[in-house]
Image (cartoon, helix red, strand yellow):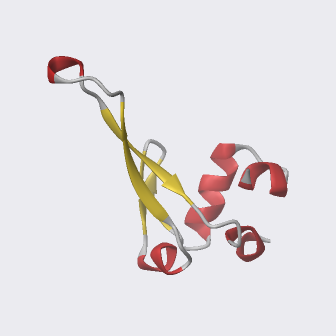
Amino acid sequence: MIGKDLGMTVKEVYLLLKDKGFLDGEEGNWSLTELGKLVSGQVRQKDNGEGGFCRRTWSVLSWDEKIVNKLK
């Protein structure tokens, strides 16, 4: 949704978030900075609902819609 509001791809948005100091890391391994946490960035854990060897988890970053104004 952020990308749509800014007319950017997901990759471009992540790079912009990094440039503005909200994210640290690289593609596939992003983490929130302290600044990112202050503007309501959240890391949520998702899983595939399976157990044992089939269980897979991954992190999903989410942002308050107000972040768009900070990226303009």
Q: Is residue 24 visible?
A: no
Q: What residue is rendered at 81% in x and 49% in y?
A: 4
Q: Is residue 37 visible?
A: yes
Q: Please give left or right for residue 69 compared with residue 27 in the image.
A: right
Q: Horizontal and vertical percent for residue 28?
A: 44, 42
Q: Horizontal and vertical percent for residue 16?
A: 65, 61
Q: Is residue 12 above or below residue 53?
A: below
Q: Please give left or right for residue 57 compared with residue 31 in the image.
A: left
Q: What residue is rendered at 50% in x and 81% in y?
A: 38
Q: How many marks?
A: 0
Q: Horizontal and vertical percent for residue 12?
A: 69, 50
Q: Between residues 44 and 3, which one lies in front from this camera angle?
A: 44
> In this view, which residue lies farthest toward the left?
52
Q: Please give left or right for residue 1 compared with residue 11 in the image.
A: right
Q: Between residues 45 and 26, which one lies in front from this camera angle?
A: 45
Q: What residue is rendered at 32% in x and 28% in y?
A: 49
